Amino acid sequence: MNKAELVKHLAESANVTKAQAEAVLIALVLTVKDAVRAGNEIAITDLGKFSATERAARTGRNPQSGKEIEIPAKRAPKFSPAKSFKDLVNA
C-alpha cells in the first residue's frame, strides 16, 4: 500500500475527504519525526512505539579493499511493534 492508497483507505474508514485524511496523515508523520528527533518516544496503543536508539562507534571493514574503517557513533530510528500487532500479523 502506498501513500495515496493509504489516504484513500483512511478517508473511507473515517468518512472524511481525502484532503482531510492526507492532512492528518502528514501531521502524524511530522509529529512522530519531531518527537523522535527530540529524543522522545511515541507509543500508539495496539501499534507500537517509535523511538531513537544510540549506536556506539565501532570498527568496520571496507568490503572492496578489506581495509579497516572507523564507523562513528550515531542515533538511529527504532520501531517496536506492540504485542497485539505482532499477534495479528502472525495469526
Image (cartoon, rainbow, N blue to C red):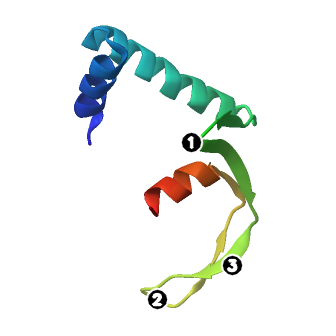
Q: Residue at x 63, y 54 (%)?
A: 83
Q: Is residue 60 visible?
A: yes
Q: How many marks?
A: 3
Contact between marks 2 and 1 (CB within 8 A): the answer is no
Contact between marks 3 and 1 (CB within 8 A): the answer is no
- Residue 13 left/right relative to 70: left
For the residues carrying marks 2 and 1, which lies nearer the camera in this image?
Answer: 1
What residue does disc 3 label? 59
Q: Which residue is at the front of the view, 63 or 79?
A: 79
- Residue 44 left/right relative to 26: right
Residue type pointed to by label 1? Leu
Give the distance between the C-alpha atoms of the residues marked 3 and 1, in whole angstroms: 35 Å
Q: Is residue 70 above or below residue 11?
A: below
Residue type pointed to by label 2? Ser
What residue does disc 1 label? 47
What secondary structure is marked by label 2? Answer: loop
Give the distance between the C-alpha atoms of the residues marked 3 and 2, in whole angstroms: 15 Å
Q: Position of residue 40 (x, y in %)?
A: 75, 34
Q: Is residue 40 above or below residue 68?
A: above
Q: Position of residue 86 (x, y in %)?
A: 54, 57
What secondary structure is marked by label 1? Answer: loop
Q: Is residue 81 visible?
A: no
Query: If the image is split into quadrants, where does the N terminus sit?
Result: top left
What residue does disc 2 label? 65
Looking at the image, is mark 2 or mark 1 earlier in the sequence?
A: 1
Looking at the image, is mark 3 or mark 2 earlier in the sequence?
A: 3
Looking at the image, is mark 3 or mark 1 earlier in the sequence?
A: 1
